[in-house]
Every structure is written in C-alpha cells, then in structure tokens.
Image (spheres, rainbow, N blue to C red):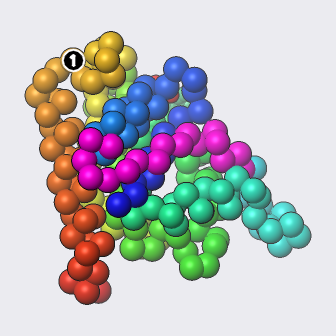
Amino acid sequence: MRVFVLAGSSRADSLNSRLAELVTGLVDRSEAVADLAHIRDFAVPPYDGDAEAAHGPPEGATALRDRVRQAHAFVIASPEYNASVPGTVKNAIDWVSRFRPQPFKDKQTLLVSASPSMVGGNRGLWALRVPLEHLGARVYPDMFSLARAHQAFAPDGGLLESGLHERLTATVKAFLELVEADTRYPCLRHR
Ligand code: FNR
C-alpha cells in the first residue's frame, strides 16, 4: 500500500515538513510505503484559465497529479495562514482538480497541521476539508493539529510529549487500517 505524504509549506525550516517526516516514518513502520514530497517540488503559477486553454496544465500540476494517482492514500501536513488554508496549497489543489479522471475522487485522505499557536493550525484543516471533500476525497474524520509546534519536536524527530506522540501514532494506524480495508474491499464503500 502506497501513501503519498505532502508537506504543504515552502519554508526550508518548516514545522509542517517535520510533521510530514514524522508521519512518513510512522507509515514506513507499518506495512505501507510512504512517498514524501514538498509543495515546492510542484511549482505551479496561480491558476489561470486562459493559460490552461493555451498551454495545458503546468508540469508541476501533472507531476502532483501523478503522485496523488499513484498512491492508495494521501496525507497532507498543511500550515494555517490567516485561519485558513495557504493559497499555495489551495492553488495546487485547483490545478490538480482540472484533470480527468479527477485525482482526488475517492482518495482516502488524512489532514495534519503544525503551528506555533495554541490551536496548532486546526482552523486551516477545516478550511482544507472543504475543497477536498467537494472533490470527493474521503477525508478522515479525525485530524491531528500540533500546537506549540516550535517546541514540540524531540531531536530524533518524534514528539517530546509522549501522549501526543501516541495519539499521532494511533491516528495514523487507524487511518492506514481504514485505507487497507478500503483497498481490499472497495465493494463495501457507501455511495
Ligand atoms: C501565519 N501563521 C499562522 N499560524 C496560525 O496558527 N494561525 C494563523 O492564522 C496564521 N496565519 C499566518 C499567516 C501567514 C501569512 C503566515 C506566513 C503565517 C504562522 C504559521 O503557523 C507559522 O509561520 C508556521 O511556522 C508555518 O508553518 P511552517 O512553514 O513552519 O510549516
């Protein structure tokens, strides 16, 4: 089982990249294989319908589409900007949504975030649910938001607070079990 993990920040020293790396490690310790990438790996201009009509989608959108398509499941670690989803992340989703078949449809998806704030970017994840659910992604009900993230990581990349580390581990495990059941028994899906 292949899980595409996308870090949604362009910053080199990103807290969300650290969280994405932690999730990648948890996935790799299960029977699944993680495929980690960063949003900056998929350079796309602001969505422009005229440019799309004239030139088709940019290479970055095609590459991101391929990574989403090749995975059984998708995890995104996204920052919160102004109580919402960063424009870069939404713009990338907009470009990818233009392909047919539409790549997010039926994709099992887990949302996580990290922020220095006390709420950990959770409002951004609620905003991120809207376009993904609109596109038919099966967004896992439980989300993980890491508060005070600048002080939360241990030198080995885990979380200093053992209860939090256990909660993230349990969330990823439960998500992967769902993905595996969905992959094995797609006929059980409710439509
Ligand atoms: C932020 N940040 C932020 N944090 C938060 O918890 N709620 C918010 O609404 C915002 N708004 C916001 C807007 C903009 C434009 C920026 C640049 C930043 C702070 C943000 O969580 C912090 O910079 C994180 O470190 C960003 O994630 P990465 O880059 O570390 O992954």
Q: Amino acid at mark 1?
A: Leu
Q: Position of residue 89 (x, y in %)?
A: 55, 48
Beta carbon of the mark 1 residue lies under 8 A of ligand 1: no
Q: Is residue 188 above or below residue 125?
A: below
Q: Position of residue 81 (x, y in %)?
A: 49, 36
Q: Is residue 40 magenta?
A: yes
Q: Is residue 93 above or below residue 106?
A: above
| Secondary structure state at the residue bearing disc 1 | loop
- Asked if residue 36 can be seen in this view, the reply is yes
Q: Residue at x 56, y 52 (%)?
A: 90
The foreground one among 125 and 185 is: 185
Q: Is residue 8 magenta?
A: no
Q: Position of residue 109 (x, y in %)?
A: 36, 59
Locate residue 187 relative to residue 125 in the image: left or right.
Answer: left
Locate residue 171 relative to residue 132 in the image: left or right.
Answer: left
The residue where tag 1 is placed is 160
Please state the total of marks drawn on the protein image.
1
Rate crowding at label 1 as few (under 14), some (14 to 19) or many (20 or more) other CA atoms within 10 Å.
some
Q: Is residue 170 above or below residue 137?
A: above
- Asked if residue 80 can be seen in this view, the reply is no
Q: Residue furthest left?
A: 163
Magenta part of the chain: 28-44
Q: Residue at x 21, y 64 (%)?
A: 178
Q: Position of residue 92 (x, y in %)?
A: 61, 53
Q: Residue at x 63, y 39 (%)?
A: 40
Quarter holding the C terminus is bottom left
Quarter holding the N terminus is bottom left
Q: Quadrant of residue 166?
A: top left
